[in-house]
Image (spheres, rainbow, N blue to C red):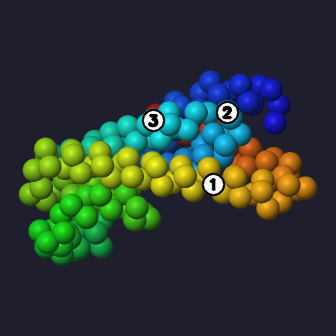
Amino acid sequence: MTPDTLQAISHYGYWVIFAGALLEGETLLIAAGYAAHEGLLYGPWVVATAAVGGALGDQLAFLLGRSQGHALLSRFPWVARRIPGVHRMLEQHEAWAIIGVRFLYGLRIAGPIILGTSRIPWKHFVGLNILGAVLWALLVFAGGYFFSSLVTTLQPESYSGVRLLLSLVLVWILGRVLWTFSKK
């Protein structure tokens, strides 16, 4: 990586992590784990930034679901048909659903919107959402950090190639996030 790239990751990395975690963020957080392993970012700050971004993003999606969820979800009949079943499941497993929805692929945005259409009290959602965001940030970050550690341990002779590949992935993610937000 060039010195400019390293400096950009160190300088803008936390902002990119926050923005990415507002929406999905898993791939970005894995890459941030790699960057922390390389000393470009500080691990506890990565986790805290991702947890705050993830909790805020899900909170906004929940509030969107509370105010406009049924109208929004009616545009997707296959989702709308499942809402009563989801609500019944929530009555039995509310805490697990709120914490776990961020771990279900494809439901990171839709899940909190659907939860917002339920009778879950807002204050109850907030606490469990924060807990889920912290757990998510810790686990996904740890996956990226330990993957990077494993790669350097198992394949020291090809480490520079893996490092280049992961660096390119990180730069691609940064570019996608910046491009997405520049279009809005």
Q: Dot 1, crowdedness within 10 Å: few (<14), some or many (≥20)?
A: some
**Above/below status of 99 relative to 32:** below
In primary-sequence order, the first of circles 1 and 3 is: 3
Circle 3 residue: 49
Instruction: Tell me which amino acid carries mark 2.
Output: Leu
Can see residue 64? Answer: no
Coordinates of residue 29 in the picture (x, y in percent) = 54, 47
The reply to whether dot 2 and dot 1 touch (C-beta < 8 Å) is no
Q: Residue at x 9, y 57 (%)?
A: 119
Q: Residue at x 55, y 52 (%)?
A: 142
Instruction: Tell me which amino acid carries mark 3.
Output: Thr
In primary-sequence order, the first of circles 3 and 2 is: 2
Circle number at residue 146:
1
Residue found at the far right of this picture: 157
Circle 2 residue: 40
Mark 2 to mark 1 CA distance (whole Å)? 15 Å
Instruction: Tell me which amino acid carries mark 1.
Output: Phe
Q: Quadrant of residue 179?
A: top right
Mark 3 to mark 2 CA distance (whole Å)? 15 Å
Coordinates of residue 1 in the picture (x, y in percent) = 81, 36
